[in-house]
Amino acid sequence: MQVALDFRPVLAAWPSLLSGAAWTLGLTAVASVIGLAGGVAGAAARRDGPAALRFAVGAYVEAIRNTPFVVQLYFIFFALPALGLRLPATAASLLAMSLNLAAYATEIVRSGLDAAPAGQGEAAASLGMTKTQAFLHVLAPPALGRVWPSLVSQIAIVMLGSAVCGQISVPELSFAGSLIQSRTFRAFESFIVVAALYLAMAAALRRGLLAAGRRFAAGD
Amino acid sequence: MVEFTAWDILRNLALAARWTLALSLLAFIGGSLAGAVAAFGRLSASRVARAAAGAYVDLFQGTPLLVQLFLCYFGLPLVGVETSAWTSAALALTLYSGAFLAEIWRGCVEAVSRDQSEAARSLALSPIQGFVHVILPQAARLGVAPTVGFLVQVIKGTALASVVGFVELTRAGGMIANATLRPLPVYAAVGAFYFAICWPISAAARNLEVRLNAGRD
């Protein structure tokens, strides 16, 4: 059995690969900002919100964490139009990624807040800060610092998960791979190259965000 | 055109859910074997074994499961294996699960091994005896909760097998949504099926974590 691999036609399509990688990173960047903000808001709501809100946020977190991302994406893209909300594929992908990240980030940030010494909140209150001020300026920053590595891992998971957005024809990296394999008939080679790009991107993302987190923490 | 009642939709989804469960079970069992081998490799004294197991874990944790599925689907025929959606999905999910389980289990062994293995040595147990009788029982106790929790990731991961044409819950949902032109209730039901399968397992993992770690610290 002779296996002859030929990567040349795949590598010749480098502009498509580059554009796909840029799409993947762009989707991840936008979803990370929205998802992290949502996670901080969700964690705050679960700590200090009224009972109904705490329950609603808890239900949302459990619903997202116990269903597959692809089903969440299909629900937003294929089912929501029946309710009159028709989103283009890119917006549907961003919404699905952001909602997914926000649910996991809610739990991660919450564990960071739980680890805060009780005196911290009391100190802020004794300085006459409101609850919101204390949360934003005193409690949240060190909590985020504590759980930053977990948040970075979760962002990387969301980036890898975004590969499925190609299924609703968002031109991200795995979609580029599918397109190249249909043009070159070099299916295995196409996805080897795509996998290598994802591997490099995930490593770079982790390293970059962890370094950024250390700088942010050092500047505190 | 055939009319689908709500009962028809639920019955067909329930039938497809059996394939989700079968694929999950297969991937979890296969992944446990692959994960055990890789965990031993990571903990081994041999540099080659450590590097090989580390590369395996990094590769499968650093690439999308979907791309792993495509690689198995298109790669198996290159080595002369007749491919199908079932075989490629089973292989990809097994390798994926193995990489994550290896890391979970390695972490558990390392969490107990430092002073415990010295204690075992001081009792004149051989390294193997120490591992089997001292380290492993404690590591297994630590590992139960995260392993059960990872089962949820495997079940959710099987949804991607729909992309290579394996008819499980997600794929069946898509087909029924197209046939009935009622995507909203169908995809909501698909989500509910996953939730009904995964949520009790997540809850069990949380309970186990509280119960099994109660005696520590």
Image (tube, rainbow, N blue to C red):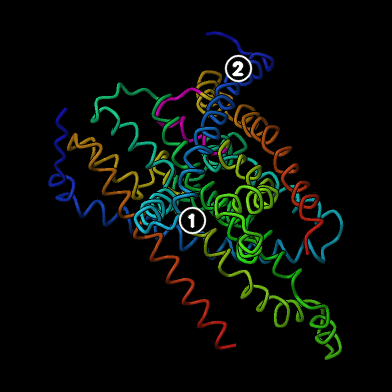
Q: Residues within 10 Å of mark 1 (few under 14, many from 20)?
A: some
Which chain letter matches label 2? B
**Residue at disc 1, secondary structure:** helix
Q: Is residue B195 or residue B100 the one in the foreground? A: B100
Viewport quadrant of the C terminus of chain B: bottom right
Front disc: 1 or 2: 1
Q: Is residue B33 above or below residue A60?
A: above
Residue ID for mark 1? B43
Where residue B40 appears, as percent x and y from the top left, is: 48, 49
Left or right: A191 with respect to A2? right
- The magenta region covers B156-167
Q: Residue at x 73, y 78 (%)?
A: A139
Residue A84, picture quadrant:
top right
Sort mark 2 into few (<14), some (14-19) or many (20+) by Cα contacts within 10 Å. few
C-alpha separation, residue under disc 1 versus residue under disc 2: 42 Å
**Chain letter of the residue beneath label 1 in the structure image:** B
A188 left or right of B32 in image: left
Q: Is residue B100 visible?
A: yes
Kindly identify which residue carries mark 2.
B15
Q: Describe the element under mark 2 as helix, strand or loop.
A: helix
Is residue B108 left or right of A32 when viewed as pictured?
right
Residue B25 is one of the magenta-drawn residues = no
Q: Are marks 1 and 2 on the same chain?
A: yes
Measured as percent of width and height from the top left, residue A103 is found at: 64, 54
Majority secondary structure of magenta residues: helix
Spot occupied by residue A78 in the image (x, y as percentages of width and height): 52, 35
- Three-letter amino acid code of the residue under disc 2: Leu
Residue A216's place in the image compared with B63, above or below, is: below
